[in-house]
Every structure is written in C-alpha cells, then in structure tokens.
C-alpha cells in the first residue's frame, strides 16, 4: 500500500459557525471571531482601527468581528496583526469605525 503524504489535519483550525477559518477569542474587550488573512489573499486597501493607518494590498493582517453578530459584514474590521494583539493596551483611535 502506498504511503500517504498528507499532513495531520487534527492541528488545523476548524471553521466557527460557518464563517470560514475564524477562531473565537475571549478578551476583556469582548468575545470576537478572528481570522488571519495572508498577504497573497489581500487585494484591497483597508484602514486599521488600532492605528488609523492603511493596510495595503499584499499585507498580512487580521479580520475581527464581535462574536455576538456572527459575521455581520458591517461589523468586520481589518487590523494590523500587531495592532490587534496590542489593542488592550492601546484601544481604537478616536475615528468612528
């Protein structure tokens, strides 16, 4: 019998509630669904609510939305990875997002 060269899929993240490859995060600022986006998958420019700078196409980043909304498109925000990780220390900018 030939050998299977498939990676062990038990370590891969599982979709949360049918919202792609998002994972749930519980934090002091609420419960979030979070998805990492690779640089190769980005084609638009977004504005990070953490630093108010642009996330240009080709930049890996994080998409996060409140878990209670289960993926409402209006509530999804694109964050730089480091801004998302440090949001508890910094908080969002004064700009309404």
Image (cartoon, rainbow, N blue to C red):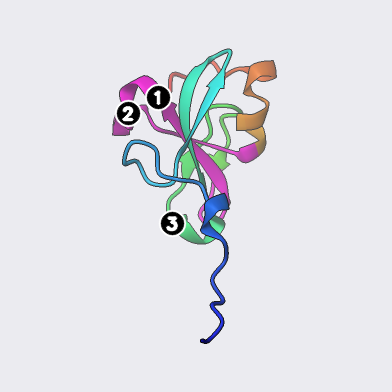
Residue 19 percent coordinates (x, y): 34, 41
Quadrant in which residue 15 is drawn: top left
- Which image quadrant is residue 82 in? top right
User: Which residue is farthest front?
Assistant: 1
Viewer-nearest of discs 3 and 1: 1
Tell me if mark 2 has few (under 14), some (14-19) or many (20+) residues whose alpha carbon lies within 10 angstroms of its own. some
Asked if residue 60 lies in the magenta stretch, the reply is yes
The CA span between labels 1 and 2 is 5 Å
x 68%, y 26%: residue: 86
Count of residue discs: 3
- Numbered label attached to residue 67: 1
Q: Are marks 1 and 2 in contact (CB under 8 Å)?
A: yes
Looking at the image, residue 89 sits to the left or right of residue 31; the answer is right
- Is 64 colored magenta in this rendering? yes
Categorize mark 1 by other alpha carbons within 10 Å: few (<14), some (14-19), many (20+): many
Image location of residue 20, percent across then percent down: 38, 46
Q: CA distance from mark 3 to mark 1?
A: 25 Å
Question: Which comes before the other along the chain, label 3 or label 1?
Answer: 3
Q: Residue at x 47, y 55 (%)?
A: 42
Residue 91 falls left or right of residue 32:
right
Task: Point out which mark residue 70 bears.
Answer: 2
Q: Which residues are magenta?
A: 55-81
Please name the residue that numbered disc 3 is placed on: 43
Cβ–Cβ under 8 Å for marks 3 and 1 = no
Give whichever of discs 2 and 3 has the lower sequence position: 3
Query: Residue 22: x and y, percent?
Result: 45, 40
Q: Specify whether 4 is left or right of 15.
A: right
**Separation of marks 2 and 3 at Cα, in angstroms:** 24 Å
Q: Are marks 2 and 3 in contact (CB under 8 Å)?
A: no
- Residue 84 in percent (x, y) is at 60, 31
């Amino acid at each position: 019998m030939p050998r299977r060269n498939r990676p062990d899929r038990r370590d891969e993240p599982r979709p949360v509630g049918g919202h792609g490859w998002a994972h749930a995060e519980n934090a002091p600022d609420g419960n979030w669904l979070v998805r990492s986006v690779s640089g190769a998958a980005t084609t638009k420019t977004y504005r990070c609510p953490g630093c108010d700078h642009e996330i240009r196409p080709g930049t890996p980043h994080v998409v996060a939305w409140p878990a209670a909304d289960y993926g409402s498109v209006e509530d999804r925000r694109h964050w730089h990875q480091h801004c998302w990780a440090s949001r508890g220390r910094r908080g969002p900018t004064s700009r309404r997002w």
